[in-house]
Image (cartoon, rainbow, N blue to C red):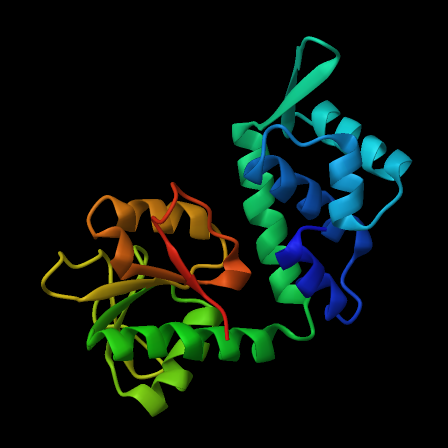
Amino acid sequence: MNGKVKEAAGSSGGADPETEITLGVLDAVHENEKVTQRSVARDLGIALGLANAYLKRCVRKGLIKVNQIPPNRYLYYLTPKGFSEKSRLTAEYLSSSMTFFRRARQQCEAVLQDCSEAGWSRVALLGSGELAEIAILCNAEFKLDLIVVDPEAAIGAHLAGVALERSLPAPGKVDAVIVTDLTDPQARAAEAAGHFPAARILAPAMLRVRLAPATVKRSEP
């Protein structure tokens, strides 16, 4: 697996191997369209035949598109369905991981510390799920002024004592954005990138957010 998937799988405490391998394949293709069956096998730590089988399965399911280029080489692309499946599997993997809380706490502390050290006191959390709650708990040490953004939030609602808002405030009303959405972190980061400078968008590394180079700052402990 690639570095981040290896780390997650090594401490997963019983996560479904099929989910891990499929997610690893989709991650590998997302990161590098010039991947080969051999490089996927090496990065995921699986047999070449198994890597070949999972790539073919993803192609059959419409998750990956493959184009042949001479001489006897291939380019792999994630389809829109593949991006959706990658997001779904990421959420499933993180939710089922027995080490989720420990890793989430460490990485939320890291991004909050980044904000504190940069002098950003007003921070928006994009997503109102478990990761946002963990970030709020971690904030007891940093005492930043947090809000949580959830388009479906009820008026006047709160999460762990923090106000929920339906839309992301404009730059100036908050200093930085932390992606905490588990369902589709990629989309939430892209939305933030349309309004905030690249350096002011952060995401825990466990979310595997990928945008243009340097668009998202991902912190690990």
Q: Residue furthest left?
A: 172
Residue 12: x percent and y percent?
A: 73, 68
**Residue 98 in the image: above or below residue 189:** below
Q: Residue at x 36, y 50 (%)?
A: 189
Q: Residue furthest top?
A: 70
**Residue 15 in the image: above or below residue 147:** above
Identify which residue, 60 or 1, lies in the foreground. 1
Residue 83: x percent and y percent?
A: 54, 37
**Residue 100 in the image: above or below residue 193:** below
Q: Is residue 216 left or right of residue 80?
A: left
Residue 52: x percent and y percent?
A: 83, 31
Q: Residue at x 68, y 64 (%)?
A: 7
Q: Residue at x 62, y 58 (%)?
A: 4
Question: In which quadrant of the rendered view does residue 69 lie?
Answer: top right
Identify which residue, 141 or 212, lies in the foreground. 212
Q: Is residue 108 left or right of residue 70?
A: left
Q: Residue at x 21, y 52 (%)?
A: 196
Identify which residue, 134 or 176, lies in the foreground. 176
